């Protein structure tokens, strides 16, 4: 699995948005703005070339959904590239070092903090996976 700084250009094939997930997990399918269950969403997006999972940066539950999507796709053997808006293109070498296991967490947290103000704990599980 690779982490890349990506600029999404063109058509998104699948887009979902986790919203109001305090009581029960609710995911909104963007094509028709209808709520769907996680399993239904995964079935619908499994063959997509691009999947965009939107979130509110400070909502941990949203990042948990992102990680669940990553885990399920990875578990099915689907090759993944994860695009992150917070890293500029010139940080790609650092991202590559991280994904190759050539950078310890403390050093990567410094890279992360250089480019992003949100708490590390919100994104840590995704980066560690």
Image: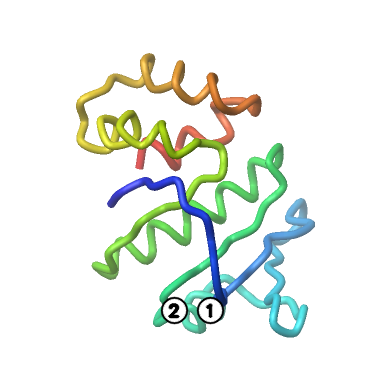
Q: Position of residue 12 (x, y in %)?
A: 56, 74
The residue positioned 68% from the left and 41% from the top of the image is 57
Q: Position of residue 113 (x, y in %)?
A: 54, 20
Q: Position of residue 40 (x, y in %)?
A: 55, 80
Q: Position of residue 48 (x, y in %)?
A: 44, 79
Task: Pick whichever of labels 2 and 1 is earlier in the sequence.
Answer: 1
- Helix or strand or loop: what does disc 1 sit on? loop
Residue 58, placed above or below residue 36? above
* Image quadrant in which the C terminus is located: top left
Task: Name the one closer to the observer, 5 or 40.
Answer: 5
> Neighbour class for label 2 at 10 Å: few (<14), some, many (≥20)?
few
Taking the image as shown, residue 52 lies to the left or right of residue 3, namely right
Residue under label 1: 13
Taking the image as shown, residue 113 lies to the left or right of residue 34, namely left
Determine which quarter of the picture holds residue 89.
top left
Marks 2 and 1 in Cβ contact (< 8 Å): yes
Residue under label 2: 48
Marks 2 and 1, how far apart at CA: 6 Å
């Amino acid at each position: 699995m690779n982490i890349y700084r990506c600029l999404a250009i063109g058509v998104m094939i699948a887009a979902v948005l986790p919203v109001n997930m305090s009581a029960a997990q609710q995911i909104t399918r963007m094509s028709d703005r209808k709520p769907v269950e996680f399993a239904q969403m995964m079935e619908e997006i499994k063959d997509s070339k691009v999947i965009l999972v939107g979130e509110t940066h400070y909502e941990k539950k949203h990042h948990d959904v992102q990680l669940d999507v990553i885990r399920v796709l990875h578990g099915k053997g689907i090759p993944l590239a994860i695009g992150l808006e917070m890293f500029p293109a010139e940080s790609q070498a650092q991202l590559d070092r991280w994904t190759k296991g050539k950078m310890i967490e403390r050093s990567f947290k410094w890279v992360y903090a250089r480019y992003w103000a949100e708490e590390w704990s919100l994104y840590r599980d995704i980066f560690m996976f």
